[in-house]
Image (spheres, grey):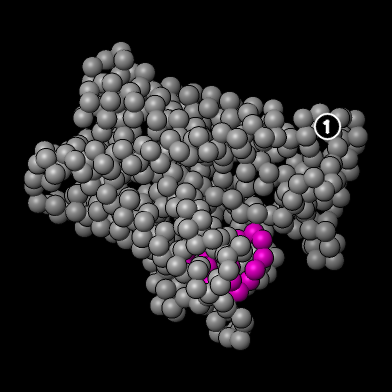
Amino acid sequence: MYPEGIALIVGLQIGSGIFSSPGIVIANTKSVGASLIVWSLSGVLAWTGASSFAELGSAIPLNGGAQAYLSYAYGPLVSYLFAWTAIIALKPGGNAVISLIFAEYINRLFWSHSRDEVSPDDIPQWAIKLTAVGAVVVVTVICTVSRKLGSRAAVVFTTIKIVSLIAITVLGLIQLVRGKASTSFRQPLFEGTSRSPSSWSLALYSGLWAYDGWDQANYVGGEMTHPERNIPRAIHSSMAIVILTFMLANISYFVVLDMVTVSMSNTVALDFGRALFGPIGGMVFAFMVAFSCFGALNGSFFTTSRLIYAAGKEHFLPALFGRLHTSRQTPFNAALLQAFLTISFVVIGGGFRSLINFSVVASWAFYFLTVLGLIILRVKEPSLERPYKAWIITPITFCGVALFLLIMPIIAAPAEAIAVLGFVSAGIPVFYITRRNEQDRPRIFSWISSCWSRSWRRRLNEEGWESVEGDEPTEMLEGHLHS
């Protein structure tokens, strides 16, 4: 299981982010050298997080990932707020980012046919958003028409994604060996580096979003023999592979493209292919990345609709979303909710770069609390059995940097920070309304819950929906925002 564990962790992290985030990182850091430092720092921070989550996974062997650990360390309210934020904000926001990346690549592909040179600013935002909404609608149909259609395409999409990244890395390194590097590598690497902490934090947000998926690394431990030895081996090996791969991909981008071109682009792979092979090369790379993004969107929708379905059955959300359609046996209502939320983020979310800031701030608030819980449990329960135990400096470093990343949005991204606070706070009354134990609810929430339940029960009795027991797992499994 050691090689399989490495493959799983690597596959979870390599997503659409490496094809879109480099432009945001260089735009904020202002130099190639600083950009590469951000990518390495993001990887090391993800590494410390994965190691910390691995300890929690071995000490608290429960389904649910961060949700289970938060419940164990802080109680049900914090755990619920994580699940609530994941369903209402994190997953839809992440899906909106992926759909916008797909839309930008498709539109650059289309507009490149009509003009010789197309700047990213030349593409109207309405065209990008309309394409993104169309992708969401198509994926929703795929996930609701058949229970297996969405999962069958995952292998093909993943293969294309990996092939694209390998091709970019190899071609860029060949150019470097041939001595044909762009101006990005012929000038001082740190010339013009930004000294603004807020700019560095925004760059880190984009780097961390590209590495997202490390928080599920602990899932490999359940099937491993000798987890105390094999979990750290799998995590350390896979994180080294991902960091090296991302660093080489970024070097390849800067070998072929100048710094200004990269900083202006959310579709850097298309510009990379176009610079090497002309319009045909741009088309090929754009198609490959767009195809892999569509696959990532498809996979995320498939898992997230099941997450919402499980939340409905467990009464974390209204029971309407925990019901399957009588003929298709798919979580139709859950998929519609997911589509509605994702489209809302696409339309009013402020664009690709703003949505990345929002997603990272929201997720890292709970990552910080989760790893802080590890430190608290070290003090409160020192005798708790831990098959794998990280060095104490690992969670301390993670919490220190995560705290910096959570403080900086007040200056660097205040709108996104306020939005995250609003989404999380909205979950508090919902938590009490949906509580099964009446004695734990404030009286006003018990009354609201009773009215809600009676209203939905009457409506559902008139329609062709039914709750199907025992056909799917109902644990609140934490899925990911992959990039």
Query: Does 18 lie within the magenta span?
Result: no
Q: Is residue 22 visible?
A: yes
Q: Residue furthest top?
A: 114
Q: Residue at x 33, y 42 (%)?
A: 166
Query: Disc 1 residue type?
Result: Thr
Question: As displayed, is residue 103 above or below residue 169?
Answer: above
Q: Which residue is mark 1?
A: 326
Could you classify mark 1 by the number of other residues whose Cα lies within 10 Å: few (under 14), some (14-19), or many (20 or more)?
some
Question: As displayed, is residue 105 above or below residue 68?
Answer: above
* Image location (x, y in percent) of residue 461: 91, 34
Picture quarter with the N terminus: bottom right
Of 385 and 448, nearer the camera is 385
Question: Residue 320 falls in which quadrant of the image?
Answer: top right
Q: What secondary structure is the magenta-colored segment mainly?
A: helix
Q: Residue at x 34, y 30 (%)?
A: 285
* Image location (x, y in percent) of residue 64: 64, 59
Q: How many marks?
A: 1
Q: Is residue 448 visible?
A: no
Q: Residue at x 36, y 60 (%)?
A: 240
Q: Is residue 475 left or right of residue 218?
A: right
Of 280 and 229, nearer the camera is 229
- Magenta region: which residues? 49-66
Question: As displayed, is residue 59 above or below residue 135?
Answer: below
* Image location (x, y in percent) of residue 232: 47, 69
Q: Secondary structure at mark 1?
A: loop
Q: Residue at x 40, y 49 (%)?
A: 210
Of 94 and 348, nearer the camera is 94
Of 322 and 408, nearer the camera is 322
Q: Is residue 291 left or right of residue 61?
A: left
